[in-house]
Amino acid sequence: MARTLEATIDIDAAPNDVWTIVSDLKRMGEWSPQCRTMRVLGGPVREGTKTINVNKKGLLVWPTRSKVIRFEPNKSIAFRILDNRTIWSYELEANASGTRVIERREAPNGTSKVSQFLVKTVLGGNDGFEEELLEGMNSTLRRIKSEAEVAR
């Protein structure tokens, strides 16, 4: 069963500046080591927006689809990966230094049978895959922090 994964970072920038970065889903490939691209379908990102994504691990490349299920400017964005049922989110909280960002990967109803099979047989097993995801989340947040703090 997929567990909830969470990574946190404090960024020396205002929530609205950090929001500009995390809500620009078409730039996700710049931050995430696994998600190489997110193609936003339709107009500006908002609740209900759909994306087509390309993920990569080593030589493996696979597509996913997602839908934005929460969009609260300067506070929170979440999208559900339609292919495996996981929910990825970014929560922004103002703090003394600027903004705390919490990235989560949740699977409240478990992942799809196809996803479970692929993680087990192709992606190295659940424990190893989740550890890689957590490392990737921390890397993503460090890249977002770097971008936000340079932009200030």
Image: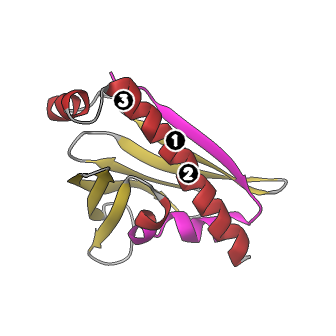
The residue at 49%/34% (across/down) is 5
Whether 4 is among the magenta residues is: yes
Name which residue lies at 44% across and 55% down. Answer: 33
In three-dimensional space, the C-alpha distance between marks 1 and 2, rounded to whole angstroms, equals: 6 Å
Is residue 16 among the parts visible in the rendering? no
Magenta stretch encompasses residue 92: no
- Where does residue 14 sit, x and y in percent of width and height? 73, 66
Q: Residues within 10 Å of mark 1 (few under 14, many from 20)?
A: few
**Quarter holding the N terminus?**
top left
Question: Mark 3 falls on what kind of element?
Answer: loop
Q: Is residue 108 above or below residue 63?
A: above
Give the amino acid at mark 3.
Pro
> Which of the 4 quarters of the picture holds residue 111?
top left
Q: Element under label 2?
A: helix
Q: What residue sits right under mark 3 in the picture?
A: 108
Location of mark 1 (residue): 135
The amino acid on which the numbered mark 2 sits, given as a three-letter code, is Ser
The answer to whether one can see residue 77 in this image is yes
Q: Give me the disc on residue 139.
A: 2
Q: Nearer the viewer, mark 3 or mark 2?
A: 2
Instruction: Assess disc 2: are there few (<14), some (14-19) or many (≥20) residues with their C-alpha within 10 Å of its C-alpha.
Output: some
First in sequence: mark 3 vs mark 2:
3
At label 3, counting other C-alpha atoms closer than 10 Å, the crowd grade (few under 14, some 14-19, many 20 or more) is few
What residue span does the magenta drawing correspond to? 1-27
Report the front residue among 78 and 37: 37
